[in-house]
Amino acid sequence: MCDSVLTEPPLLDLISHSSTGVDRQQAPYISGKLQLPASCFSLLYRVTKDGHDARHINLADATPDELEKLTRACEPASFGRKQETVKDENYRKAVKMDSEYFSPILDVFHTDLVNIIYDCLLEGTQSTKRIKIELYKLNVYDKGSFFKPHVDTPRSKNMFGSLVIVFPTPHEGGALLLRHRGQEWIFDSGKELAAKDEPSIGYAAFFSDIEHEVAPVISGHRVTLTYNLYFDDGPVPAVSKHLTPPLVNEGAFREAFTTLLEDQEFLAEGGTLAFGLRHVYPIKDDLKHVHGVLKGSDALVYQNPVLYTYYEHNRLEPAEGVLVDRVVNFQKILDHESQRLVQFLHAEGGILVNVNRDLLREYYTDMDDGTTEQVEWVTPMTTFNRKGDVYVSYGNEAELHFVYGDVCLVVRIGKVGDRLAYPRVAELNRRR
């Protein structure tokens, strides 16, 4: 059994920002380095397709001669062009071996790679589905090899992406370049795996619609295993252990956010930022337990975020919505038949968001007590963690209404010069 003992962080998209706010986006790929026991780098392969001659290679310390023998046992790599499989060394120069002709000791499901894919690539309801990881090919890129920009051909309607594992065979060049919606990311496995302290693999997992290419190899051998990623039926399986990797761009996020907070025009008097969650969590009446299990881009949010349930409903006027620090039991509204929904949530400790203060002062003087807040949404609200409820309101006759709450992260920042003095809601109201 092959168990991972150390995880280095995958890459998520960096934080872009402007004079009006910050955007937090999760990149459509992950990459990083993973330390593994030495046994995981062993590979058996057939020298000939009839199987009469087979060899073993340890890709953690393979010699140039051993790598040349592996290269010669492969055949020219093809690629898909429209509906055809073609070989064209002007577009792709590399060699490959189909999965039936080799056997790696490495078992992906006994490493942290499965958890990394769940926690840092998949979002929302995708992260609650079972996935299948299917070994596809072994590829060798030696000096002068490359693969020009392309998009992988889906093998079925359930295929959502690819996983590439790069072994620590010395090589220069051969970086993986990924592009999507005008952005480009680079994973240079030669540089990442150059340190020989402990044997490690490089990895990159990305969605099927991501354009990618392999830059020319300058020297050495870039040896990879390629896997197809599929959604499968059934619940998420238990894996060997759950180790959420640290986020490699956390420092960049902090730096971007710090730069923004140094801008004296950005929320000069302090304010409140809200983030829609990008992952699914087990939501109970109390939200405290969720803080310890935030994952992926949700875990990147700047210092001291607070979880709230955000209720948005057309019966919440004069507020745009209401933040409550738990999931509300709406059955209790039956005990307050004279209350409107907004008054009930306010009585439950709710904070009125983005209110029409003129209406508030004219019609809801009982709620004009400082429990309002102007919120800037950094990333839009998502419904991955929605809790629904029903209540009865009384007018000319009893009516049944549905109300929904979505869990979100809220960050309060202080005024210019004292950003880390997180203001209370009442303080924010006094400044307006």
Image (tube, rainbow, N blue to C red):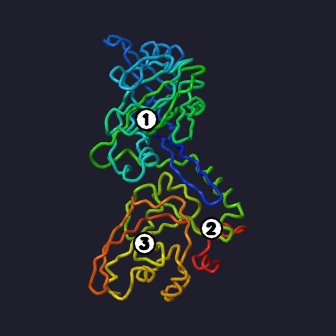
Question: Is the residue 125 above or below the residue 51 in the image?
Answer: below
User: What amino acid does circle 3 point to?
Assistant: Arg
User: What amino acid does circle 1 point to?
Assistant: Leu
- Marking on residue 163: 1
User: What amino acid does circle 2 point to?
Assistant: Ile
Occupied quadrant, residue 219: top right
- Which percent across, then down, holds residue 217? 57, 22
Circle nearer the N terminus (2, 3): 3
> The residue tagged with tag 1: helix, strand or loop?
strand
Q: From the viewer's perspective, is the residue at label 2 or at label 3 nearer? A: 2
Q: CA distance from mark 1 to mark 3?
A: 39 Å
- Marking on residue 304: none
Q: Is residue 220 left or right of residue 225?
A: right
- Marking on residue 413: 2
Q: 349 or 247: which is nearer to us?
A: 349
Question: Is the residue 76 above or below the residue 26 in the image?
Answer: above
For label 2, the crowd category at 10 Å Cα-Cα, with few meaning under 14, some 14 to 19 and many 20 or more, is many
> The residue tagged with tag 2: helix, strand or loop?
strand
- Which percent across, then down, holds residue 158? 32, 40
Q: 308 or 172: which is nearer to us?
A: 308
- Which percent across, then down, holds residue 425? 57, 76
Q: CA distance from mark 2 to mark 3?
A: 22 Å
For label 3, the crowd category at 10 Å Cα-Cα, with few meaning under 14, some 14 to 19 and many 20 or more, is many
Residue highlighted by disc 3: 326
Residue at 50% of width from left, 85% of height from top? Answer: 367
Q: Which quadrant holds the C terminus?
A: bottom right
